[in-house]
Every structure is written in C-alpha cells, then in structure tokens.
C-alpha cells in the first residue's frame, strides 16, 4: 500500500495524537505517508474554518494537499460523497484511539470502507449545522 493518509487529529497532531471525533470539526490533520505497507513520514496541517465553503471546504483542502485516503470516525453523508467525487478513499477509524493505531489498522487491513451507515445526521440534505 502506498498512500497519503489524512487523519483528523487533536492538537498537537502526529502519530501519538488522539483522533478528532468528526473530520470537519477537528483541530488539524495529521498526514501520514505510507509506502510499501510502512509509515514513511508524517506532517501536520491545520484544518480550514468550517464556515468557508461549508462541509466541502475540508474535502477540497485535503484534496489540494495531495491526500488520497482519509480515516475518520464521523462525518455527514454530503462530505462522504464529496470525498468520493475527488477520488479520496474514506475508511472508518472504528475503535482506534490514536492516529498511529488507526494507520496501523489500515495497513493491516482491519478498517472497513466508510459507508452511509457510518455517517452522522449532519449532511444528507438536512437543514441546519452539523452536530
């Protein structure tokens, strides 16, 4: 597996950081380079204000930084569809507590693809802000 993986993170970010509960409202993203099934590097980038572009602003932000895979614990249906449209695969982080645990679970093939059943009520055409 070779990928640039984004994981919503709590400040200060990095492999030991707790995972941010909802991708669009996290403090920042830890970007992990995976090469040949191993962690080859990491960097931290800030999140973008949710108001500028709504749910799609973080999608475009990550796509613009070269991300091709995201591990998330929660997101609405609209951003999930947005990730699919820009070619970013989304996996459900499940029980992983830290960025490093989530990446290792991904490498080991233990994370399911994020599907509509994992989404929260935030998007999907419902009026109002994300929870």
Image: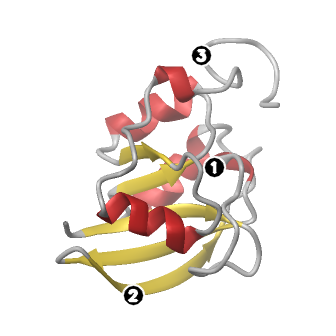
Which residue does the image show at 74% across and 68% down from the upper left? 10
Quarter placement of the C terminus:
top right
Estimate the spatial distance between the alpha carbons at disc 1 and disc 2, rounded to whole Å. 21 Å
For residue 88, say whether it is visible.
Answer: yes
Q: Position of residue 80 (x, y in %)?
A: 48, 33
Q: Earlier in the sequence, mark 1 or mark 3?
A: 1
* Mark 2 element type: strand
Crowd rating for badge 2 (residues with CA inside 10 Å; few <14, some 14–19, many 20+): few
**To which quarter of the image does residue 112 belong?**
top left
Q: Position of residue 69 (x, y in %)?
A: 36, 55
| Circles 1, 3 touching at the beta carbon (< 8 Å) | no
Q: Is residue 95 above or below residue 80?
A: below
For residue 65, say whether it is visible.
Answer: no
Q: Earlier in the sequence, mark 1 or mark 2?
A: 1
Q: Position of residue 129 (x, y in %)?
A: 81, 27
| Mark sitting on residue 124 | 3
Give the number of the mark in front: 3 or 2. 2
- Give 56 or 93, whichever is nearer the viewer: 93
């Amino acid at each position: 597996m070779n990928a640039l993986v984004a994981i919503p993170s709590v400040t200060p970010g990095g492999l030991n950081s707790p995972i941010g509960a909802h991708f669009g409202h996290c403090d920042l993203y830890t970007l992990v380079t995976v090469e040949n099934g191993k962690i080859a590097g990491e960097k931290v980038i800030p999140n973008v204000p949710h108001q500028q572009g709504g749910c799609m602003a973080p999608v475009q932000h990550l796509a613009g930084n070269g991300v091709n895979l995201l591990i998330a614990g929660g997101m609405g249906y609209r951003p999930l569809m947005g990730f699919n449209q820009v070619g970013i695969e989304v996996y459900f982080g499940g029980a992983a507590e830290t960025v490093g645990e989530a990446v290792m679970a991904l490498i080991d093939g233990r994370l399911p693809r994020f599907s509509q059943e994992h989404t929260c009520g935030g998007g999907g055409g419902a009026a109002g802000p994300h929870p």
